[in-house]
Amino acid sequence: MPERLTRVPPLVALIAIAGALMMVPAGKAVADGNASLARIFFYWGLLCLLLAGFVAIAMAGQTRRSSVPGGPFPLLAAIYILLPAVMALPLADALPQLRYVDAWFEMISSFTTTGASMLDLPRRVPNAVHLWRGMAGWLGGLFILSAATALLAPLRLGGYEMIRRNPMKIPRSGAAAGSGMRLRAHTMILLPAFAGLTLALWMLLTMMGVPGFDALMQAMATLSTSGVLPRETLGNIGLGAEVAIFAFLCLALSRRFLPGHGARTRALHRDPEILTAVVLISLMTLFVVARHWAGAFETREGENLPAMGRAAWGAAFTSLSFLTTTGFVNQDWIASRVWSGLTPPGLILMSMALLGGGVATTAGGIKLLRLYSLGRLGRFELMRMIYPSMVVGGNEYDRFLATTAARSAWLFSMVFALTSVVVVALLLFSGMSLETAMIFGVAALTNTGQLVQVAGDLPLYWVLLSDPARVVLALAMILGRLEILVLLAAILDRSRRN
């Protein structure tokens, strides 16, 4: 029987895990003296555990199909739609102001690590609810890491087409059952490192003076790049805490920091993703500081070096945060307006979120390795204009990045752009203006929910959206999280079968 229970569908196992995790906010509510809220989380968690257990026992003896049409997309899409629906049950019961549809959107936002909150006054929400939101984002970050390495990597999808030259051959007889087993095995490999890093950052932030609960939320939001916090912003947590968060955000810049992905002959300082991120953050910081410095001269504050240093740190921290699609905005980014009298250029943060972080990380967006590959292709094409018979040099992987991988990156960029146009068009039909639709569409597809508050002239709020717009953006979050090429692969596979 134990061996049969290990073959239960991943969705059923995740529902059981979600039910077990509901006991944590129940305990937090008990510690805060909120017995009614504790009962809500406890009862829903117990119900989820019972239902998942019954379904697992009922399906344990069944023979699974030998193949799954469409590859991993149906499984992942079902998880990203149905699991948040289960996780929304205690949230809708705990907050009467939220309809179930709103709670479902909130959980999709958290589980896809988008961080688009439907709570208009988060300070009035109990900490146990915020803890559940943060845990949903943390679980979503762990799940996308496991799904990427277990399900997408063998098929050269989800960014792995930029790494692997050839797809792995998986026997079709074990495709269906093997998906759950591979997902479970990769999760057990990644879980100790993911949980250990979260614990380490939590302890560091606590030692630097951040309150324990806030430090836990910030640690989970950083490692999962969800940006889910119990407050509207990161707040004034101090320079030491921001440096610690900055260091851990760097983990989302490259796959090399994942267990099993770090064995490379190339030195760390020559990693394409890290080099691209350093260039982007440096250019972003120089642009923002130069802009504020020019404005400060008009107000006779151009020689205020401490203010210039704070503006530089605010630009570097915020740019890294949005490059990894986390969405933290520190106080120095906001306070730089006092020095120069100019509004911080929020629109540039949209471009940072579009570029995204590393392949096979919790970051969303187009991904840095694709940008690096397109840059190499452009460089060689310019050189061919001078030397038409030139041959691409470098080692095998460098040639792969400048040829086959670059074509894949160009394909993904075009598909991403077309998908953005479709999402924006649907939002326009729901009654939005063009600028607002673009900001919301990019925020959803890049899984950077905090972008709507800083990209425009005035902050925007997810809670003010209409129901049709929420459905469109929820599906856009899932597409952005899974990457659109996975959907295209499923469609092409289905068309070949027909």
Image: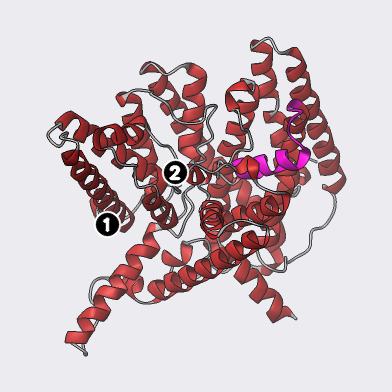
Position of residue 51 relative to residue 76, above or below, is above
Residue type of the residue flagged with mark 2: Val
Q: Which residue is mark 1?
A: 266
The span picked out in magenta is: 94-110
Is 120 contained in the magenta span? Answer: no
Q: Is residue 102 magenta?
A: yes
188, above or below 497, in the image: above
- Total labels drawn: 2
Horizontal and vertical percent for residue 25? 66, 23
256 or 248: nearer the viewer:
248
Q: How is the image coloured?
A: secondary structure
Circle 2 residue:
454
Give the side of residue 3 with respect to residue 163, left or right.
right
Say left or right for 458 vs 43. left
The amino acid beneath tag 1 is: Arg
Q: Is residue 411 visible?
A: yes
Q: Nearer the viewer, mark 1 or mark 2?
A: 2
Q: Position of residue 475 (x, y in %)?
A: 66, 56
Residue at the spot 70% in from the left edge and 53% down from the top edge: 471
| Mark before the other along the chain sequence, 1 or 2 | 1
